[in-house]
Image (cartoon, rainbow, N blue to C red):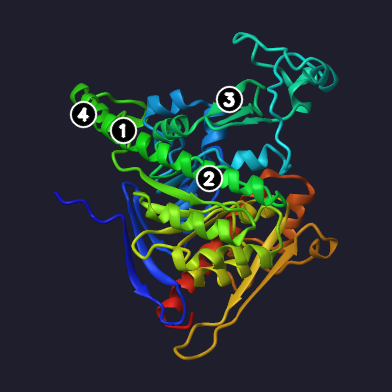
Amino acid sequence: MKQEKFFKVLFQSKKSKARLGEIRTDHGVIKTPAFVPVATKGTIKSLWPELVKEIGIQVAFVNTYHLIDHPGAEVLAKIGGIHHYANLKIPLMSDSGGFQVFSLGRGKNKILDTVFLGRLTPDNARGNPQAIVSKKSSSLPKTDNNFVNLPLLLKISEDGVKFRSTFDGRLIEFTPERSMEYQRQIGADIIMAFDECISYGVDYRYAKEATERTHRWLERCIKKSQKSKVNSQNHNLKLKRQNVTLFRGYKSKFINNQYLYGVIQGGAFEGLRKKSAQFVVDQPVDGVAIGGVSVGESKREMRDQVRWVADYLPNDRPVHLLGVGQFDDILDLVKYGVDTFDCVEPTRLARMGTIYQLKVNPPIRRAKFKVVWEEIDILRGKYRDDLSPVDKNCSCCVCQNFTKSYLHHLFKQKELLGYSLATYHNLWVMERFFEKIREIIENGLM
């Protein structure tokens, strides 16, 4: 039986590079442009998995670093991957671990070349850089006030990156090959090549070195990924013969079809961005991601970084923009040919009591459309007696059944249900927003 094409362009705008498409995976079809909520540790925080489909979420993003930190890649491999483990029945993307170069490094330009390990306070560590912890004692309790005050990003080299676990302080080493193997064990449908997410503000020399290193890592990822496909097919065949059945009747298997995206870097430098785009697009990858944006730069600078590479993006493969999810950014950047966007903001803001309200004028052919959005802080005192719906224009079950006063009450009393309801609503709004974007593109208005 012939396998269907991974990505198909269904409609191309004549006004911009905006397009409608379909991404086909083993766990379903993604209609693009699409939003990708972040399920870092295998969960969209506070959201029951059965509600994911109800909201209309098409795809989510899991984080390799956090999942191999806990519960560990071996656990996920035993049950057949993150879909089975978390009971997530939609396509999933996985980050390579490269973003942790930025996030665990706290965005600092200076990277420590010495690996500090062991039961050391920061002062002792500075005075004793040779101290090394044994394998048995590499797990450090946070209560000892040691590793939590030491750098979590330890070393970047040609071979890979060394991190300290945020869970127990042990050493975690990522190389391109390990990242590919970890992501194979996690079992996401779409995987990212290991890259270095460049912090905003680094000088040209560092950005050039990091970008070129990312390119060399991509070549290694491609080589490892090709070998992994063969190994997975052989593994699946073996398990099929053994008829291995696990929890909830799942068959222990790995996904045959994982699709690799190369990541464009280059920092805030136009020349580096364009060279990186040319290099990545020329590689035998299934899709392309734009990385290293929204890491501290202004909105204008972020838009420039996407605009610089727009003419180099592929027509026949999907394009993902890493870490961008505000309404105005999405409206502007989808015009450059971006198909999918991931961001933690809708769910993170929801847990802080920030509720989205959105109004999109119905797109009429040859008419202007207008998108108006607002964020309300449900913790404000004025909502205590407000018995109106959360958003009278919203059709989600939260807005149909609960008032602003009730959500205000839940958040003030720190009731967990408040986080769930706000998360449900914000993601519902994001999905309806992207439905409108697809409609607007189809009607030739973007």
Disc 2 vs disc 3: Cβ atoms closer than 8 Å? no
10 Å crowding of disc 2: few (<14), some (14-19), many (20+)? many
Q: Where's residue 438, x and y in %?
A: 44, 72
Q: Which mark is residue 172?
A: 3
Locate residue 159, reporting x and y percent: 52, 30
Q: Secondary structure at mark 4?
A: helix
- Mark 1 is surrounded, within 10 Å at the Cα level, by few (under 14), some (14 to 19) or many (20 or more) other residues, namely few
How far apart in space, not on screen, are marks 4 and 1 (Cα)? 16 Å
Q: Which residue is mark 1?
A: 227
In the rendered image, which residue does mark 4 sit on? 237
69 up-or-down from 364: above or below: above
What residue sits 56% from the left and 82% below the top? 361
* 407 vs 182, nearest the viewer: 182
Q: CA distance from mark 3 to mark 1?
A: 23 Å
Q: Earlier in the sequence, mark 1 or mark 2?
A: 2
Label 3 and label 4: CA atoms lie apart by 32 Å
Residue type of the residue flagged with mark 3:
Ile
Pick whichever of labels 3 and 1 is earlier in the sequence.
3
Mark 2 — residue? Answer: 212
**In the current view of this chain or complex, which residue is farthest to the left?**
1
What amino acid is found at the position of numbered circle 2 in the picture?
A: Glu
Structural distance between the alpha carbons of marks 1 and 2: 23 Å
Q: Is residue 388 shown above or below 444?
A: above
Mark 2 / mark 4, whichever is N-terminal? 2
Mark 4 packing: few (<14 Cα in 10 Å), some, or many (20+)?
few
